[in-house]
Structures are given as C-alpha cells and as structure tokens.
Image: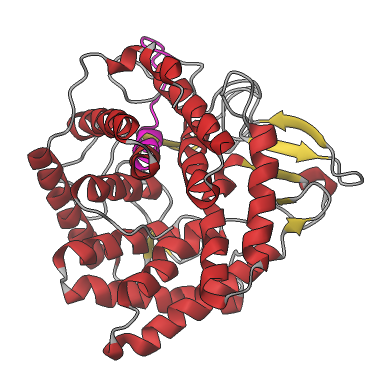
Amino acid sequence: MDKELYVRKNWLSAAPELNDREAEEAFAVCVETVKRNMAYFGRSFPAAASVDGIYPKTANDDWTDGFWTGELWLSYEETKDPAFKREALASVADFERRMKERVVVDHHDMGFLFSPSCVAAWRLLKGEEAEEAAVSQARRTALAAADNLMGRFQEKGGFFQAWGTVGDPKEYRLIIDCLLNMPLLFWASEVTGNPVYREKAKRHIRTAMACVVREDYSTYHTYYFDPETGAPVKGITQQGNRNGSIWARGQAWGIYGTTLSYGYFHDPEYERLFDGVTACFMEHLPSDLIPYWDFDFHDGSGEPRDSSAAAIAACGLLEMARCADQEKAELLTSMAAKLMKALTDRCLLREGAPGAGILLHGTYAKRSEENGVHESGVDECNLWGDYFYMEALMRMRKDWERYW
Ligand code: GLY
C-alpha cells in the first residue's frame, strides 16, 4: 500500500461512518422501495433516470435495465421472498428475448446489462433442481451477451470499442466504464473453459490502464486510437465537464474497475493504480462527501451532485478490502463507511411514492460547452445509483458473492 498517498489526505478526519444498525435500516428501506416499485412497474422497466422524482415506465431497451433486475436479486437474497425471484426471473426471460431480437445490444455494455441480471441468476440459483430451466436460460443468455461483446474487440489497439458501428474511425475508442463489462468475460471463460474471453478482457484492461489514468491519477472518460496503427491518440470526455477534467462517475468506475482487475491478476501495478485513482477521488470530494458531477466543481459552485459516483466508489473500496492486508482493509472499509454514511444521511429517499428511486441527487448527463451531451437525469435518481448503493450496503452487512 502506498501509505503516503492515503495518510496525507484529509478524508481520514472526522467524517462519521455508517454503523451496522444504520446499514440494516437503510437496506430495509431499499427493499421496501424495490417491493413498491415491483408492483408499480409490473413487467415494464424503470427508465435510466427519474423525471421529477419518478422513473418513467419503459421497455427493456437501455444500458441500465440490468440494474433493476439486480435490485430484485439483492432483495431476494435478503428476504427469500419468492415474489422477488419470480420478477427477477421474468426479467431474465426478457433479457433472453432482448438478446435474440438484438434490441439495443450493438454497444459494449453487455456486463452492465447481463451481470446483475443473468449472471446473478446463475450464481444464486445454480444447483436448485426446481430452477434448472431458469439457470440454463440465464447461462445461455449471458454467454450470448459475452459473445456479442467479443465481436467489438479491436485487434489494432487491443480494446473493446464502446459505441457505434464496429471499426468506425469516429468511434474508435474505449471508455473507462467498460472495466465493469470485463467480469462478464471472465465469467464466460470460467463456465465454458474457453480462455479466449479472459484473454481479450486481459488485453482490454491492459490497454485501458495504460491510457485512461493520467499521471496525477485522475482519469479520462474515453480514449481514441488510430484505426490504422492501433496507436493511442487522445483522451476526451463524453459526459464530463471538459476533456481535461475529472468526471466524478468516470473516476468511480476507475476505482471499481481497477479493483476488479487487481482481483483477477493480482498485478501490483493495478493496485498502485487503484490507490492512486481512489486517493484522487477522495481528495476531490466536497466537505459533505457527496461528489459534484464533475470535480471541476466544489463547495459553493451550486452545480448538481452525482451521488451514484460515491455508491460505485464504496463498492470498489469494499471489494479491494477483501484482497488487502488488514491495515489497508480497515482503512478502505472505513472510507467506504464514511461515503455510505453521507449517502444515507443526505441522499437516501426513505418514503418515496410508487416509481420513485432509492438514491436522490444523481446526475446522468449534464451538458457543458465541451461535452455537448443531451442533458438528462440531472439531480434525479438513477438506476445504477440505486443498485450500487444497495450493493454497497449488502457488502457492509454480509460476505457477499458478487454478481460481477
Ligand atoms: N456507463 C454510462 C454512465 O456511467 O453514464
């Protein structure tokens, strides 16, 4: 552990930690919300982000739908209520339809979609005789998604192309978020015995680590390559404030992504990167620990927050704590508990209306002069914020087998 990196930061100070009782209570609130929303959404899916506090009802056609199924699985794991299992399995069946009909699957987010839905089903139900057909459906659907992702691998550059038509020079890039899509490929190698998924994932991770992390451990959101030579070209943002700024959620994907990569390879270089991106994230937090959507902004800026970035970061810290020596594990667990306390006190929606989310104050995409994105979900709930907040609470309470 790079002790120096951690010890000089002010986040070891007085911020309170979420205690066991508070974590139990918060998780119970989440499960109640999922239950209420299960009735509200029926067989539709919540949209990526709420609008005026309520998620619109949508079909299974965005990169975020797996998080809803993941919330159902987390609730099922906790309660063993068969209603959660029934709805989660209905989602898994819908994911098989989606994959077969190729509904919005021409992009790299196969892990976000199929790990918390289908891989989770496989992990939770395998071995249950009564669920054999469902487990086999989940397995073949997740493998079809892994094969789909493999079709986006670019030999020149050695990475998975995030968006657009495969090979399009205007889209010849990877994005930091894709580190969370790699576990699907490790899982595919594990269940098929075919090493090719893992090998491609390994190459993507190596490429991403070499280009998205800047010298000061801040991160680029996306990175372009030359389609002719595969040489790295430049980092630019898609959802951050500026090309050179630190998009809070991208930095959080970096924390969780470097953790997972370290877990696969135990490469000390990935631990060094984890330490760096984590320290950078914590160092840029405002005084109440709820990140602004981009770290260009600080206390008093009046800019919106992105609570989901803190929830993702907490999951990454808690995952790394499992691989670390005792001293570092204690430090990481304490940091995660501080983030979770802040989220619980300031962002947890305790009694929402049907269709409302779990974690307030997320930002999906805020438009700026440099990014030109379509603005949506600003100061709203979003599905991944709800999911990762629940995952982090689950991790704080149990020795949890991850869906990733
Ligand atoms: N992975 C897309 C996002 O974080 O908005």
Residue 14 position, x and y percent, is 20, 14
In this view, 271 is above or below 201: above
Residue at (92%, 46%) from the top-left corner? Answer: 228
Front residue of 398/377: it is 398
In this view, 202 is above or below 359: below
Q: Toward which corner of the image does residue 238 lie, by quadrant?
A: top right
Q: Is residue 282 visible?
A: yes
Count of residue discs? 0
Residue 148 position, x and y percent, is 65, 68
Q: Which residue lies furthest to the right in this view?
A: 228
Residue at (41%, 19%) from the top-left corner? Answer: 3
- In the drawing, does residue 97 fall left or right of residue 155? left
Residue at (15%, 42%) from the top-left corner? Answer: 23
Q: Does the magenta stretch include residue 307?
A: yes
Front residue of 165/139: it is 139
Q: In the rendered structure, which segment of residues is drawn in magenta?
A: 298-315
Picture quarter with the C terminus: bottom left
Residue 267 position, x and y percent, is 56, 42
In this view, 351 is above or below 400: above
Q: Does the magenta stretch include residue 291?
A: no
Residue 329 position, x and y percent, is 31, 35
Q: Can residue 98 be seen in this view?
A: no
Picture quarter with the N terminus: top left
Q: Toward which corner of the image does residue 121 lie, by quadrant?
A: bottom left
Indicate the colouring scheme: secondary structure
- In the drawing, does residue 235 fall left or right of residue 277? right
- In the drawing, does residue 218 fall left or right of residue 47? right
